């Protein structure tokens, strides 16, 4: 469903004379093989910001130029800060020593007031299994990147128009059926940018340059960011179980193992939208089945197709999903088939979105640590930063993994009960409702965000806990339509559309198998609940929880709402005393397709 009554009209294979400004800036790197000396010097001068061209190039180095949005709202002056994104393919493993180094880096260079109201250092786990450093000052960029390199990690490909961090199930590292973690590392290495400019800008040890021959990026790189995910197979109680903790089909390319040597690829997934244009969120379409021998070649072909054909004038239409939507999946199959042999797709269940929390017993004993919204920071109720540092000092042999749902999995444990008791001295036990809720960063850090998400969601969950106790339903919240926290696949998703305003997405569920959409009347295309004030979100969810609790018949809430249908949900909310005043349709009409 496309949220706009304007045409969706990408300009594929955009001629150079129509390229946008970002494309022209990227050209100066010649496929990230060189960077002009004046731009290199910008990273070392005394100013607190980067020029437009330098900020574009910085993205591929895992650095975003941002400003404190709270201060800007008050003073209209931009306090420039930087976010650094550390790339960890497959989420790990991270050794105890590496965690100590990252913790020390965060203490030296970061602050966050996301939960505490006063600046404190933190690490931020992401849904792409990266680790982010927030509120870094420009004067510290070089030292921070150099310190990160000492940990054995890097920030190259962390942001920018290239293949981003490749995600995979952390527990698959120990699977005898299929190791998606290892495959993610192989893919990430293949699509890593040339390392020469990165080494030059940040004055790194040249031995860092260990990239084998891989993907050939165009002089102006890719059209937009490109995301790849690999789902997993586990052996549990003697049975092979599918695990889609990565939500593979929400990516540009989702890799789903059939049996560990055959893989079904899904193409054209993506959650990001744009409020000013005809855009949409969608799950990828099945392309075909590939062997382990042809898989990386197939990925090369697909990324090359996107690089050649994707829109380079309109960034809001530059993602692969618009190429698949306009040209069709059969066209993509034909283009891939010109270079790689593959079999037609089959009907395949991708598996449930597993969170991997608490004691875990697959082929390894592990423990999943709930990290609320991925923010590793000391708070009154949960001393995440202190506790995790104490953990790696007390358990020096552990291997740590970041999950695709912003939590941590700790492995190499001999005594799960003892470890759980140790962790409980630092961290509170969350309710199911809180455990299944996810938010992106949002205000004040992310420059794309319209409003709060990470700071707001814990308060919203607290209100729902007081009203509803320990419901086991998924809630997602994003500060803007980029939807990094994937709220559209949750039972109830909320997306920032303005300051302290949110749009409802409905149709997802706790399994993560379905794509949610705005609340659209299927007959008229009218869209409801697109600008709900933050203090009314609990009222809307109250009404929906009441509907589910009185009419649900044992099935999950997401399934119940899909069966009921938007028409009846809209009628119900129009008649409910808590929501009736909110049920005026938006001026925007949806294109139903």
Image (cartoon, rainbow, N blue to C red):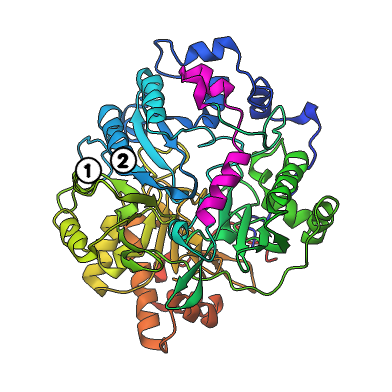
Give the label on residue 99, or none. Answer: 2
Which of these two is toward me, 320 or 449? 320
On the image, the x and y values in percent for residue 118 come to 19, 37
Q: Which residues are magenta?
A: 180-208
Q: Is residue 520 left or right of residue 96?
A: right
Give the label on residue 389, or none. Answer: 1
Residue at 41%, 13% (x, y): give it: 47
On the image, the x and y values in percent for residue 391 come to 21, 48
Count of picture labels: 2
Which of these two is toward me, 114 or 587? 114
Looking at this rendering, what residue extends furthest in the bottom direction? 553
Q: Is residue 195 magenta?
A: yes
Q: The N terminus lies in which quarter of the figure?
A: bottom right
Q: The C terminus lies in which quarter of the figure?
A: bottom right
On the image, the x and y values in percent for residue 238 come to 46, 78
Which of these two is toward me, 265 or 573? 265
Q: Is residue 562 left or right of residue 357?
A: right
Residue at 30%, 31% (x, y): give it: 105
Q: Quadrant of residue 66?
A: top left
Q: Is residue 63 magenta?
A: no
Visible in this render: residue 272? no
Labels 2 & 1 near each other (Cβ < 8 A) = yes
Secondary structure category for the residue under label 2: helix
């Amino acid at each position: 469903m496309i949220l706009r009554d304007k045409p969706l009209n990408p300009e594929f294979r955009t001629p150079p004379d129509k390229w946008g400004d970002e494309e022209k800036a990227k050209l100066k790197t010649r496929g990230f093989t060189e960077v002009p000396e004046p731009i290199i010097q910008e990273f070392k001068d005394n100013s607190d910001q980067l020029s437009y061209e330098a900020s574009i190039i910085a993205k591929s180095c895992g650095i975003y130029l941002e400003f404190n949005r709270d201060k800007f709202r008050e003073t209209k002056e931009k306090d420039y800060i930087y976010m650094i994104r550390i790339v960890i393919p497959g989420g790990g493993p991270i050794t105890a020593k590496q965690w100590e180094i990252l913790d020390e880096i965060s203490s030296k260079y970061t602050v966050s007031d996301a939960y505490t109201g006063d600046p404190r250092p933190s690490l931020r786990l992401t849904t792409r299994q990266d680790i982010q450093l927030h509120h870094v000052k420009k004067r510290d960029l070089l030292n921070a990147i150099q310190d990160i390199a000492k940990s054995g990690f890097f920030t190259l490909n962390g942001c920018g128009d290239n293949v981003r961090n490749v995600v995979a199930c952390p527990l698959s590292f120990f699977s005898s059926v299929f190791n998606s973690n290892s495959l993610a590392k192989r893919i990430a290495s293949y699509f890593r940018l040339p390392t020469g400019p990165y080494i030059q800008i940040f004055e790194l040890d040249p031995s860092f340059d260990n990239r084998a021959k891989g993907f050939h990026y165009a002089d102006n790189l890719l059209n937009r960011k490109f995301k790849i995910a690999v789902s997993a197979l586990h052996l549990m109680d003697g049975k092979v179980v599918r695990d889609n903790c990565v939500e593979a089909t929400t990516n540009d390319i989702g890799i789903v193992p059939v049996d560990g040597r055959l893989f079904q690829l899904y193409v054209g997934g993506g959650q990001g939208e744009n409020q000013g244009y005809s855009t949409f969120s969608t799950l990828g379409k099945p392309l075909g089945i590939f062997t382990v021998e042809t898989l990386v070649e197939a990925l090369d072909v697909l990324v090359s197709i996107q690089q050649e054909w994707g829109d380079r004038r309109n960034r809001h239409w530059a993602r692969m999903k618009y190429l698949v939507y306009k040209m069709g999946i059969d066209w993509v199959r034909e283009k891939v088939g010109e270079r790689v042999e593959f079999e037609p797709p089959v009907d395949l269940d991708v598996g449930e979105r597993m969170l991997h929390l608490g004691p875990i017993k697959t082929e390894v004993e592990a423990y999943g640590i709930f990290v609320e919204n991925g923010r590793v920071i000391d708070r009154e109720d949960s001393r995440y930063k202190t506790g995790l540092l104490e953990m790696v000092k007390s358990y020096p042999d552990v291997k740590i993994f970041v999950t695709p749902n912003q939590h941590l999995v700790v492995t190499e444990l001999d005594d799960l009960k003892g470890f759980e008791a140790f962790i409980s001295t630092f961290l509170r036990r969350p309710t199911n409702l809180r455990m299944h809720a996810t938010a992106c960063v949002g205000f004040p850090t992310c420059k794309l965000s319209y409003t709060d998400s990470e700071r707001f969601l814990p308060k919203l969950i607290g209100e729902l806990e007081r009203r509803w106790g320990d419901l086991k339903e998924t809630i997602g919240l994003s500060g803007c339509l980029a939807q990094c926290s994937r709220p559209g696949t949750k039972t109830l998703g909320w997306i920032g559309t303005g300051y302290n305003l949110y749009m409802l997405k409905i149709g997802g569920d706790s399994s993560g198998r379905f794509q949610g959409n705005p609340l659209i009347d299927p007959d008229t295309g009218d869209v409801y609940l697109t600008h709900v004030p933050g203090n009314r979100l609990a009222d809307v969810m109250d009404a929906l929880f009441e509907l589910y609790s009185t009419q649900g018949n044992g099935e999950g809430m997401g399934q119940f709402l899909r069966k009921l249908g938007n028409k009846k949900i809209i009628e119900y909310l129009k008649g409910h005393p808590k929501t009736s005043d909110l049920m005026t349709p938006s001026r925007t009409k949806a294109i139903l397709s």
